[in-house]
Image (tube, grey):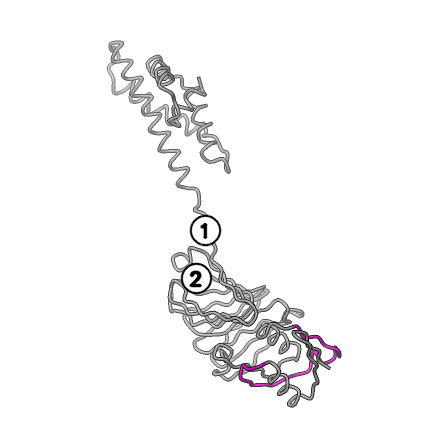
Amino acid sequence: MVDLLVRYLENRCTPQELQQVEKVLAGGRHEEEWKAALDLTAMDVHSDNQEPLSEEKSSSLFSKINETIDHRSPRVVSMAKRNMQRIAAASVIIIAAAGWLLLRQGNKPATETLAAISTEAKQQKNLILPDGTKIWLNSNSKLSYRSSYASKNREVYLEGEAFFDVAPNAELPFSIHSSDLTVQVLGTSFNVRSYQNDSEIDVAVATGKVAVMASGQQQVISPGNLISWHKQNGGFEKRTIAINDINAWSTGWMVFDEETLESVCHALERAYGVNIHFENPALRNKKITLKQRHEQLNNVLTVMSITSGIQYRRQGNEIWIR
């Protein structure tokens, strides 16, 4: 009986089974069987949350049917009318069940998709997000955002380096999640550099103000300032920077201001697709200041060796610093 009612609720009955259901409808309420059928149908519709109808919900359906039969119908009726009432009552069950099942399906959260844009070594990309925010993505970087972006939130996820020109929207702040750092703004332009093999995450502001949060700490930075989050000791360090240098990489320039040689070499690896090794590990922490047009790598290495006193040798894509 229950299997038959389940197939009826799911519109899977054969013509012969439909005749059987009609006899059931004409013969009586079969309240317990209907409850069991509703439970099984509900569990099948929402299999990832297998929860049968509560006793309260089941009883509510049948109380409405009882009211329809007992209070709206005469106490003495013909058999034909009684059968029609039973059919009408069962119809109430089916309609109520269908509405409840649709509600269950409607409450199931829509699956969000994730859009991702990435670059390889020696590659850069420009993109515009749905809200008009403009992004310049540096080499070996990846930017991701959900399909609900600009409608429910303005959150993006960054691995690598990007310059952002954020479209203003006071109701939906723009947030960047990168490693253990979060950057939040309303509308401004700034640069975030967060590569996995770098010892720090840098945020530099060109216009507006930016809130930077990490490990329960928060810093607000204004134009012409750069803040570094040191991954190892978990602290912030702030310094000034020329605004024109903040996104210089997106216009074909490489600018390094008192950065470690190791950090500079990581940037060269990403920009030119090479591997750089240190024959003298002590050179990793040597500070470098360099402003160089993005040109042939040998020219860049030659300028570095002259200005910083280092030496190098190269074999194809392998470079050794000494």
- In the image, is 241 to the left or to the right of 45? right
Q: What residue type is labelled 1?
A: Glu
Q: Which of 53 and 151 is in front in this view?
A: 151
Q: Position of residue 73 (x, y in %)?
A: 25, 17
- In the image, is 48 to the left or to the right of 61? right
Determine whether 133 is above or below 10 in the image: below
Instruction: Please tell me the numbered disc located at residue 154.
Output: 2
Q: Nearer the viewer, residue 134 or 232?
A: 134
Label 2: how many Cα within 10 Å (few below 14, some 14–19, many 20+)? many
The residues bearing labels 2 and 1 have C-alpha atoms spaced at a distance of 14 Å
Figure quadrant of the C terminus: bottom right
- In the image, is 281 to the left or to the right of 251? right
Q: Position of residue 183 (x, y in %)?
A: 50, 68
Q: Give the range drawn in magenta.
A: 275-296
Q: Which of 147 and 35 is in front in this view?
A: 147
Q: Is residue 32 magenta?
A: no
Callouts 2 and 1 close, C-beta under 8 Å: no
Question: Residue 315 lies in what quarter of the image?
Answer: bottom right
Q: Which residue is drawn at 31% across and 22% down?
A: 67
Determine whether 186 is above or below 313 in the image: above
Figure quadrant of the N terminus: top left
Q: Single out the residue that lies furthest toward the front.
A: 316
Label 1: how many Cα within 10 Å (few below 14, some 14–19, many 20+)? few
Q: Earlier in the sequence, mark 2 or mark 1?
A: 1
Q: Does the magenta stretch include residue 278?
A: yes
Instruction: Please tell me the numbered disc located at residue 161.
Output: none
Q: Mark 1 points at which residue?
A: 112
Q: What residue type is labelled 2?
A: Arg
